[in-house]
Image (spheres, grey):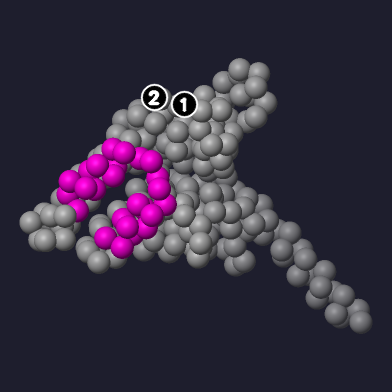
């Protein structure tokens, strides 16, 4: 009985010691993603890529925990992680993470988009086109991206446009789309779905930075980038 109790206590202590490590990895991922996103939507790409790489490192560590922490099981957390992993060049883990984020039924348009871009970077034409179809099926209402897809993907299908060139073009237009989203909607809660507001789970779709509900209601500014 005492031996069993000792083993149980030891296991609990090990689990308790692991929690700060998991939290630190997620916090590193989140903090650097927020920094990266602000740079990305202001076209400071060199700094953005630096922060995306730091973010991806934190998220990869969090995703590698056994078991994976509760926060990293959220679809929005996996979505952010996948985006960071894409820009860090970790295409396999990006695809794996975003595929898990999508699940069987959920249509997360930016997950499908970055899966397609990652598959394109890997040179898998069939998987790329399939993922772009999933992006369109999610009804993303991202006209600049869909217009560029309509322009270049027929050429990919018939062999007149290189897959790598098409991905370059769509990735460029993806940034332009997010820049325009931010210029139009940044911190204007009530003009976009609540999940995509600056205090929502998918804040980056239309905002340069997250905010808390209290900060938004009081008109205060975010201090996430201190």
Q: Residue at x 42, y 37 (%)?
A: 36
Q: Which residue is mark 1?
A: 186
| Mark 2 secondary-structure assignment | helix
| Mark 1 secondary-structure assignment | loop
> Would you say residue 117 is visible in this rendering?
yes
Seen from the viewer's position, the closer of residues 95 and 69 is: 95
Seen from the viewer's position, the closer of residues 152 and 88 is: 152
Q: Is 121 above or below relative to 12?
A: above
Magenta-drawn segment: 129-153
Q: Residue at x 16, y 61 (%)?
A: 157
Mark sitting on residue 183 = 2
In the rendered image, which quarter is residue 21 located in? Answer: bottom right
Q: Say left or right for 152 vs 53.
A: left
Q: Say left or right for 3 vs 70.
A: right
Is residue 38 magenta-colored?
A: no
**Tag 2 near tag 1, CB within 8 Å:** yes
Q: Residue at x 38, y 41 (%)?
A: 141
Q: Residue at x 63, y 31 (%)?
A: 212
How far across and how far down the image is residue 5, in percent? Answer: 87, 75
Q: Is 100 above or below relative to 219?
A: below
At label 2, counting other C-alpha atoms closer than 10 Å, the crowd grade (few under 14, some 14-19, many 20 or more) is some
How far across and how far down the image is residue 91, in percent? Answer: 34, 59
How far across and how far down the image is residue 13, in percent? Answer: 77, 63
């Amino acid at each position: 009985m005492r031996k069993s109790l000792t083993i149980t206590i030891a296991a609990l202590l090990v689990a308790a010691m692991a929690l700060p490590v998991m939290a630190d990895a997620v916090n590193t991922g989140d903090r650097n993603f927020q920094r990266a996103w602000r740079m990305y939507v202001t076209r400071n790409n060199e700094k953005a890529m630096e922060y995306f790489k730091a973010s991806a490192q934190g998220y990869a560590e969090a995703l590698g925990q056994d078991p994976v922490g509760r926060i990293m099981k959220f679809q929005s957390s996996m979505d952010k992680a996948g985006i960071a992993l894409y820009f860090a060049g970790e295409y396999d883990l990006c695809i794996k993470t975003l595929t898990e984020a999508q699940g069987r039924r959920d249509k997360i348009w930016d997950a499908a988009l970055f899966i397609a871009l990652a598959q394109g970077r890997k040179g898998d034409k069939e998987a790329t086109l399939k993922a772009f179809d999933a992006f369109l099926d999610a009804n993303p209402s991202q006209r600049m991206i869909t217009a560029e897809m309509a322009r270049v993907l027929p050429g990919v299908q018939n062999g007149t446009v290189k897959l790598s060139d098409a991905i370059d073009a769509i990735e460029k237009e993806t940034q332009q789309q997010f820049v325009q989203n931010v210029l139009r909607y940044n911190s204007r809660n009530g003009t976009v779905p609540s999940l995509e507001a600056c205090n929502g789970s998918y804040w980056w779709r239309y905002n340069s930075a997250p905010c808390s509900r209290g900060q938004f209601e009081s008109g205060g500014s975010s201090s996430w980038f201190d």
